[in-house]
Amino acid sequence: METMQCATATTTGIGSLLLRGAAKGRSSRSRGNHMRVVMRSGTTANSNRLSLLQALSQTAAVQSQRSLQSLISDITKYVNPQMSKDARNLEEALMSVPDLETIPYDLVRREADYEIRDVRPHVVAETTMSGRSGFDFASSGQAFNTLAAYLFGKNSRRSEMSMTTPVITNRGQSRGEKMEMTTPVIQQRGSGDEQWRMSFVLPAKYNNDAPVPEDLSVSIRNIPGKKVAVMVFSGFVTDDEVKRREQALRRALLKDPVVRVKANAQPEVAQYNPPFTLPFMRRNELALEIEDVFTINVASQ
C-alpha cells in the first residue's frame, strides 16, 4: 500500500512537470525522486508518453529499493532483539520471533547443528489432540482453539492472560505433574504413547496460581527443569519433517562426548510464529531431553 501511494504521488508530480515543460519548452526536475523529464516544443504525444514511462520506470526502481530497505528495517524492529543478536547467520536472524514471554532457559553451549539448554521449571496448559498426527490442520486447529479459549478467559476467574510463545507439541505422557488447585481438574490423558499433546506456556506470574480451566480437556501442569538438545529449522512442520529432524539430531548427539539422549526421550516440537508467516521466516525447534555422560558414569560406580 505504501509503495502504491508513493507511485501515485510521483505520477501526479510528473504530470505537472509535463504540463510546465510543454508550456515553457524547458527541462524540469522532480524534487521528490530526482528524476528528470525532458519536454520540448513540437514533441509528439508518443514521445511524451515515452518520457513519462521512462520516468515511471526509474521511480519504480527507486521505490522498490526503498521498500526493501523498509522491509528489512521493519523485520529488525519486529523480531526478538536478543535472538537477533545471538543469531549465527542471516537465516537464523530472519527466523527470530516477536519479543513475547517464552520458555525460560539458559544456553549451555552451541554446536554446528544444535544447542544445549538448561530449561527452567515452568507451567503449561495442555490438551490431547484428536488425530494421530500432531500437525494435521484439523486436530492442531481444534487443540489450539481449546487452549486459546482457556488463555483468553474460559477459566475460573475469567482472566485474560497474555499470549506467549511457542506452541509446543509432544507425544506420549507428559513428565509434568498436575498442579494443586482448590477446584478439582479432571485430567484426560491419551490412550497411548502415539497420541500428541499441544501445550501453551503460561506467563510466569501464574506459575503458582494458574486459573482453573472450565474445559475439562485442558490440564495445567508443572514442568520440572531439564536439559535438552535443540535443533532449529524453518518451513512448515509436518510429520515427515519432524522424523527427519529427530533422526538428524540423534545422529549429531551420538558424536557428542559430553551428553547423550535420555532413554525413551520423545521429540518435542516448538512453533514460534503466527500461521501467516512465510515459510523461510518461520522458526521451529525440535528438542530431545538429554543427560550428562559424566553424571551417568559417576552414578553407575
Image: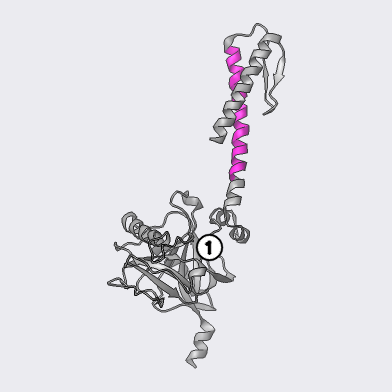
Q: Main secondary structure of the magenta part?
A: helix
Q: Is residue 279 left or right of residue 21?
A: left
Q: Nearer the viewer, residue 80 or 88?
A: 80
Question: Which kind of residue does numbered mark 1 sit on?
Answer: Glu
64 drawn magenta? yes
* Residue found at x 68% / y 13%: 21
Under tag 1, what secondary structure? loop
Image quadrant in which you'd find residue 263 = bottom left
Q: Nearer the viewer, residue 122 or 67?
A: 122
* Residue found at x 38% / y 74%: 174
Residue stretch rendered in magenta on the structure: 46-71
Residue 37 at what x, y percent from top left?
Answer: 66, 19
Looking at the image, which residue sits at the far front? 157
Q: Nearer the viewer, residue 267 or 276?
A: 276
Could you tell me how many numbered marks the image carries? 1
Q: Would you place residue 93 above or below residue 16 in this image?
A: below
Residue 215 at what x, y percent from top left?
Answer: 33, 65
Dot 1: within a 10 Å radius of its alpha carbon, few (fewer than 14), some, or many (20 or more) residues?
A: some
* Residue found at x 50% / y 71%: 229
Q: Nearer the viewer, residue 4 or 211?
A: 211
Residue 58 at least partly seen: yes
Q: Report the residue marked by disc 1.
A: 101
Looking at the image, which residue sits at the far bottom? 301
Residue 39 at least partly seen: no
Residue 270 at what x, y percent from top left?
Answer: 45, 63
Residue 192 at what x, y percent from top left?
Answer: 29, 72
